Image: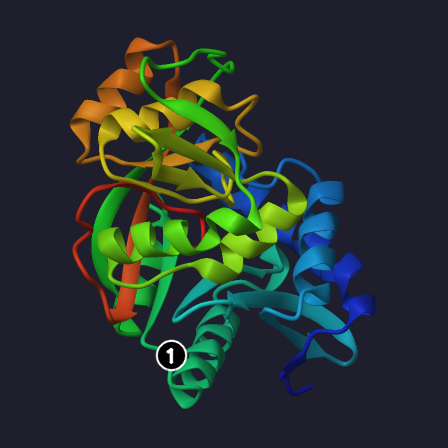
């Protein structure tokens, strides 16, 4: 029976979320890494929230009414962020992942997005090969960092919850670092009360939607970024992502009792500006 792709509906969340858990668990255990999705319940929660959010497009692959996999793309900004993409382990290596990737690439190109990005597990050579064949370039090695919250403050830097009044200044900061902004994500994080800003000498020098797997941050300096990490009450999910080539920041994290969990790779199609400043990507980009 032919496999079809269609837009996900709320009723797909249970099946797609269970597959998300099983697929990540299978590949992680095969390589002796902890799974990015720790339970079936978390997988269902992630897919439920993505399907319900108007800023995301989620596609499912199905055969005979049975969901076999899904792929999501974040469309809240000028850059599209792909993932999670997962396929039922029972039907992997049959081209479903490629078809779902081709679907979102074609969709974002038709929408005129400036670029498309994703983050892949560096130990998974098959996904690296697929994404490279599809036109993605490897841009940055990343390290997932986790550990107990530090509960510390850095001198001269005030960390406080972000508000709507901070949005314009944060958007300008992000544009200065990346050449584009992530205002849609930041606005959501402010509404969810997870966003934080750093003020130094009376102005905002860093912000984070959250110091977490799904959060991102930008800052003028590593010290400003360290202030956000030091003040974070926890690091939700598998951890937060640090550009591995930022040895100064990674060394600071390790020196404060945090540990590296797994390696990842940031990949992109289209617009990519080498960041100017300190930054933490999300699992989307």
| 196 versus 169 height, above or below | above
**Quadrant where the N terminus is found in the figure:** bottom right
What's the residue at 83%, 68% (across, down)? 11
17 to the left or right of 119: right
* Image coordinates for residue 50, horizontal then vertical, percent: 65, 61
Q: Secondary structure at mark 1?
A: loop
Q: How is the image coloured?
A: rainbow
Look at the image and tell me whether residue 22 can be seen. Answer: no
How crowded is the residue under tag 1: few (<14 C-alpha within 10 Å), some, or many (20+)? some
97 to the left or right of 137: right
| 165 versus 72 height, above or below | above
Look at the image and tell me whether residue 98 can be seen. Answer: yes
* Image coordinates for residue 34, horizontal then vertical, percent: 51, 31
View extreme (front): residue = 202
Residue behind mark 1: 113
Q: Quadrant of residue 274?
A: bottom left
**Quadrant where the C terminus is found in the figure:** bottom left
* Image coordinates for residue 55, horizontal then vertical, percent: 59, 69
What's the residue at 51%, 62% (across, down)? 184
* Image coordinates for residue 166, horizontal then vertical, percent: 47, 47
Camera-side residue of 220 and 108: 220
116 to the left or right of 5: left
Camera-side residue of 61 and 224: 224
Camera-side residue of 248 and 141: 248
Q: Quadrant of residue 182?
A: bottom left
15 to the left or right of 143: right
What's the residue at 48%, 31% (across, down)? 239
| 62 versus 69 height, above or below | below
What's the residue at 30%, 41% (across, down)? 279
């Amino acid at each position: 029976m032919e496999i079809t792709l269609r837009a996900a509906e709320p009723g797909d969340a249970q099946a797609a979320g269970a597959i998300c858990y099983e697929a990540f668990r299978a590949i992680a255990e095969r390589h002796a890494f902890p799974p990015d999705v720790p339970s079936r319940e978390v997988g269902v929660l992630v897919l439920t929230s993505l399907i319900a959010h108007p800023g995301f497009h989620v596609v499912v692959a199905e055969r005979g009414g049975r969901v076999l996999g899904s792929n999501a793309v974040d469309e809240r900004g000028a850059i599209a962020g792909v993932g999670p993409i997962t396929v039922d382990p029972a039907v992997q290596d049959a081209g479903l992942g490629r078809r779902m990737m081709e679907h979102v690439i074609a969709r974002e190109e038709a929408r005129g997005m400036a670029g498309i990005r994703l983050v892949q597990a560096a130990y998974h050579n098959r996904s690296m090969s697929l994404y490279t064949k599809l036109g993605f370039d490897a841009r940055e090695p990343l390290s997932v960092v986790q550990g107990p919250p530090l509960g510390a403050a850095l001198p001269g830097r005030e960390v406080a919850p972000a508000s709507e009044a901070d949005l314009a200044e944060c958007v300008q900061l992000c544009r200065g670092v990346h050449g584009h902004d992530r205002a849609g994500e930041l606005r959501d994080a402010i509404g969810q009360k997870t966003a934080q800003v750093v003020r130094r000498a009376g102005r905002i020098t860093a912000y984070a939607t959250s110091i977490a797997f799904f959060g991102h941050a930008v800052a003028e300096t590593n010290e400003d970024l360290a202030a956000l990490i030091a003040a974070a009450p926890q690091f939700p999910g598998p951890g937060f992502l640090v550009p591995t080539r930022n040895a100064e920041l990674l060394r600071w994290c390790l020196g404060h009792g945090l540990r590296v969990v797994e390696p990842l790779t940031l990949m992109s199609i289209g617009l990519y500006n080498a960041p100017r400043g300190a930054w933490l990507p999300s699992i989307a980009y």
